[in-house]
Image (spheres, rainbow, N blue to C red):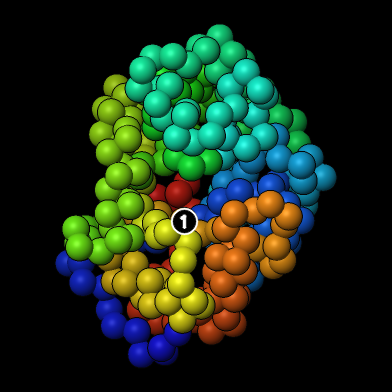
Amino acid sequence: MNPAISPPTSTLTPSLTLCADDFGMSDGVDDAILRLVERGLLTAVSCMSLGPCWARDARALADLARGRCDLGLHLDLTEFAADTVRHPLGRLIARAYLGRLDRAALAASIEQQLDAFEAAAGLPPAFVDGHQHVHQLPGVRELLLQALARRGGSAPGPWIRNTRPALGGRWNDSDDRKHRVIAALGSRALQRACARQGLRQNADMLGVYPFDGSAADYEARLQRWLDRVGPATLLMCHPASRPAPGDAIAAARLREYGVLSDPGLLRRLEARGLVPRPLSALR
C-alpha cells in the first residue's frame, strides 16, 4: 500500500472497526485471524459457532481478544447449519421473501448457534451478523431479534451488523452495485427493527467486492474504502493463511491476508487517524 495515504474525505470524526468474518470455518481462516488479532489490527471477529474448527479454537481466540477485540456470532444458514434450515444462498433468499422458511427449525438453529458460541467462547456475543448477510433477511431477522430479547443480558445488548453502504459509492462501480444489492435485501427493515428493540448498529459498512482481482487490486480497494470511513464504520474482511478444500473464495482470502498482514499497515492507519476500535468502544 502506498505510505502516502490521503486523509478521509468525511468532515465528521471517522471511527473504524475492522472485522474478520468466518472464524471457525477452517484452519487457515482461524490461523490468519488469530495472527491479525495478536498484531492489533482486527478489533472484531465474527465466528461460525457450528464451523468445524470453532470448538477447538474458540478459547484461544477469546483469551487473545480479551480487552482489545469484540467477538460476535456469524449466523450461518448456508454452510454448516442443520439440513432443515441450510440452503444455497439464492434459494434461502427466495424462501425468505416467499415466507417459506421453517420458522420452528430456524428458531432452533439460532438458539443452537448462540448456545454453541457461548459454550466455547465463555461469553455471550458482543455483536451478531450473518454469513452471506443472512441475518437481515425477512423471517430470519425477526426470529434472531426475538432470540436475543429472550436471552436478555445487560442493556443495550449486542450490536447488530448494518449492511448499509458507506457514503461515496458509485452506481457504475461493480463493487458498489453488489453492495447495494446486499443492502436492499433487508438493511432498512433491520434498522427499523433494531431501533424498536433498542439495539445498536454500526452506521455503515465497507469491504464488499466480488472476491476477484489481484493483491494490488485489493490494496487499491482498501485505499478507496478507507477514504470513505465515517463515524462508526465497519470494514469487513475474509483473510486466510492457507486455502481450504472446496472454499469458493480461497484465493481471495489469501490475497486479503497478504495485504492485511503487511507490518506497516496499522502504522499507516494510525498516521491518518484511523485507529481500529471495537464496536463495544463506540457510543
Counting from the top left corner in percent of width and height, residue 163 is at: 35, 44
Counting from the top left corner in percent of width and height, residue 231 is at: 29, 56
**Vertical arrangement, residue 33 with respect to residue 53, above or below:** below
Q: Label 1 belongs to which residue?
A: 236
Asked if one can make out residue 241 in the rendered structure from this viewpoint, the answer is: yes
Crowding around mark 1 (Cα neighbors within 10 Å: few <14, some 14 to 19, many 20+) is: some
State which quarter of the image contains the N terminus.
bottom left
Side of 275 where 9 appears, left or right: left
Which residue sits at x=25%, y=64%?
A: 173
Q: Helix, strand or loop at disc 1?
A: strand
**Vertical arrangement, residue 70 with respect to residue 77, above or below:** below
Asked if one can make out residue 197 in the rendered structure from this viewpoint, the answer is: no
Counting from the top left corner in percent of width and height, residue 8 is at: 26, 73
Which residue sits at x=59%, y=76%?
A: 258
User: Mark 1 is on which residue type?
Assistant: Met
**Vertical arrangement, residue 1 with respect to residue 71, above or below:** below
**Vertical arrangement, residue 131 with respect to residue 186, above or below:** below
Q: Nearer the viewer, residue 164 or 117?
A: 164
Side of 250 where 100 appears, left or right: left
Counting from the top left corner in percent of width and height, residue 5 is at: 34, 84
Residue extending farthest to the right is 56
Which residue sits at x=49%, y=36%?
A: 89
Count of marks placed on residues = 1
Q: Nearer the viewer, residue 269 or 171?
A: 171
Identify the image quadrant of residue 249: bottom right
Which residue sits at x=19%, y=58%?
A: 171
Side of 86 where 29 appears, left or right: right
Q: Nearer the viewer, residue 106 or 268?
A: 106
